[in-house]
Image (cartoon, grey):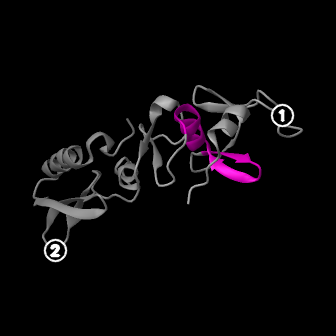
Amino acid sequence: MVKSISTPNLQYLFEYKDGHLYWKVDVANNVKAGCKAGCKASNGYTFIKINKVQYVSHRLIYQLCNGALPDDMYIDHINGDRSDSRIENLRLCNMYQNAQNRKLNKDNKSGFKNVHWSETRKKWKVQLRVNGTMKNIGVFDDLELADLVATESRNKYHGKFANHGVLT
């Protein structure tokens, strides 16, 4: 379950500017009003501690600007950059939509998202997840054709959450 904090408490604690939160109150000897809140982790997210509870800053920013969040919803970084928490780069989504906006996996061998080599068929296979279920799109002799079909399929099934494997 995602930790939440009340919107009035956020309004009391923080000011939002250009994708970052700044403390409005002194919270420690070394953290004074006006200081940028949070620490950036190696995974790209910024974390902020409030009363010994750790929060990801993009959820706090979205809530501060838009009100309370449902516990079962996610906040998606539209451009795929976890460190870019400008409000215009954040959108509410479900778990499946959040996964659809992922970039190309590092272990991908074809160089194209949702395209892999089928050793049994000796062809390029296109498959993607649609609402949590794997959907087989087809098999192709030509890698570029398979990529084109994968791109069209992502546009069809993932809509505005379609990510074609690169940061936009």
SS at mark 2? loop
Q: Is residue 102 left or right of residue 128?
A: right
Label 2: few (<14), some (14–19) or many (≥20) C-alpha neighbours in 10 Å: few
The relative height of residue 168 versus residue 116 in the rendered view (above or below) is above
Q: Please state the horizontal and vertical placement of residue 146, each as a whole percent of the image.
A: 16, 52
Task: Kindly indicate whether the residue at mark 1 contacts the one at mark 2 (C-beta within 8 angstroms).
Answer: no
Q: Is residue 45 left or right of residue 110?
A: right
The image quadrant of residue 61 is top right
Q: Amino acid at mark 2?
A: Thr
Q: Amino acid at mark 1?
A: Asp
Query: Looking at the rendering, in which quadrant would you find the N terminus?
Result: bottom right
What number is the disc on residue 120? 2
Outermost left residue: 141
**For residue 66: magenta?**
yes
Q: Please state the horizontal and vertical placement of residue 133, each as a whole percent of the image.
A: 27, 64
Q: Nearer the viewer, mark 2 or mark 1?
A: 1
The relative height of residue 76 versus residue 84 in the rendered view (above or below) is below
- Near-viewer residue (91 or 67): 67
Provide the residue span drawn in magenta: 46-67
Q: Which residue is mark 1?
A: 26
Q: How many marks?
A: 2
SS at mark 1? loop
The relative height of residue 130 versus residue 22 in the rendered view (above or below) is below
Disc 2 or 1, which lies upstream in sequence?
1
Q: Is residue 150 left or right of residue 72?
A: left
Q: Please state the horizontal and vertical placement of residue 46, each as a whole percent of the image.
A: 62, 43
At 37% from the left and 46% from the top, the residue drawn is 101
- Near-viewer residue (75 or 77): 75
- Near-viewer residue (105 or 52): 52
